[in-house]
Image (cartoon, helix red, strand yellow):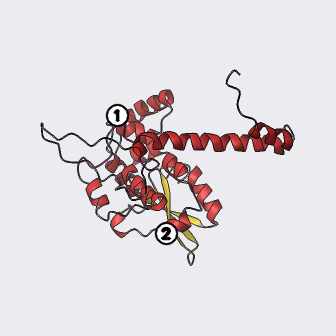
Amino acid sequence: MAHLRLGELLVQAGALTQEKLEYALKEQARSKLRLGQILVDHHLISEAAMVDALARTTGLPRLDIATIHAEPIRMRSLMDPWTAEREAVVPLHADDAKRTLVIAVADPTHVVPLDDLAFRSGLRVQCILGTAAEIGHLINHVFHGTALDRGFSERVRQPGGHLQPGEIIHSIAVEPGTPAYAGPQAAAPVQAPMEPEPSLSDLFGPILMVQERLALELQVAFELLVEKGWLSQEAYMARLARPSDPDR
C-alpha cells in the first residue's frame, strides 16, 4: 500500500475524479497542506466519504468507537500527543500474542508515523481507518483521559457529521475530563443565549504549551552543541545561570 497515494486510491475507488484530484494537487503545491485536508476544505469530498472509500479500496477495517479497545497508559510511551495530532494517528492497543499494534489513522498512505510506531513497539502495525474527528476523539481519550463516547462514530457518519472546512483536531488544548468534540450541534435559535466567558486555561493553555515546547527544543539544541564539542558544558551551564540582558 505504501506505493499508492491518497489521491490515487480515491480515484481508484470512484470517490474522486481525476480533474478534482489535479486541482487539489495544485492547491497542495501552493499551500503545502495535507491533501486530505484540501479535499475536505474545498468540498471536493466529505471526510466520511473519503474514509469509507479508502476502507473499500485498501480492505482495511473502518473505525467504530463503539467497539474499540484502548490501552492509554501503555500507548503514551509510543507517541506524544503533539505527533498524534499532527499526523492524525493514534495507537490504541497491542496484541502481544499476534505481535501486532492496532492504530487508528486518517490516511493510511502516510507511512512515516506508521513506520515509527512499528520501530518503537517492535510490533507489526495494523491500521483502522477513521475520520479526523474520530481520531481526535481517541487522542483525547488516550493522551488526556477523556471518556470514550461509544456513539461518536455513528454520529460522525451521519450526513454533515464530518469536520467542517478549516476545523482541526482539538486534542492539545483539551484538559483532562473535558468532553471531546461530539459532532456538529443543532442550529441555535435566533435569540440564542450568550456563551459563557472562556476560562483562563482556555485562553492561555495553548500559549503556555507552545512556550514549553520551544524551551524544550532550545534545550535539545544546546545539548547537541555540547555533545558535538561546539560548546563546553561549563559555558552552557553558565549561560543558563546568567539572567538575560534586556538591552541586547
Part of the protein shown in magenta = 159-171
Residue type highlighted by circle 2: Glu
Q: 103 or 151: nearer the eye?
A: 151
Residue that carries the numbered disc 2 in the rendered image: 71
Task: State yes or no: residue 131 in magenta.
Answer: no
Q: Is residue 201 left or right of residue 113?
A: left
Q: Is residue 225 left or right of residue 103?
A: right
Q: Is residue 159 left or right of residue 78?
A: left
Q: Quadrant of residue 55?
A: bottom left
Q: 207 or 217: nearer the eye?
A: 207
Dominant SS in magenta: loop
The tag earlier along the polypeptide, 2 or 1, is 1
- The tag on residue 54 is none
Above or below for 60 versus 166 = below
- The tag on residue 42 is 1
Above or below for 84 versus 228 = below
Residue type highlighted by circle 1: His
- For disc 1, the neighbor class at 10 Å (few under 14, some 14 to 19, many from 20) is some
Tag 1 secondary structure: loop
Q: Is residue 92 left or right of residue 124?
A: left
Q: Position of residue 121 (x, y in %)?
A: 62, 65
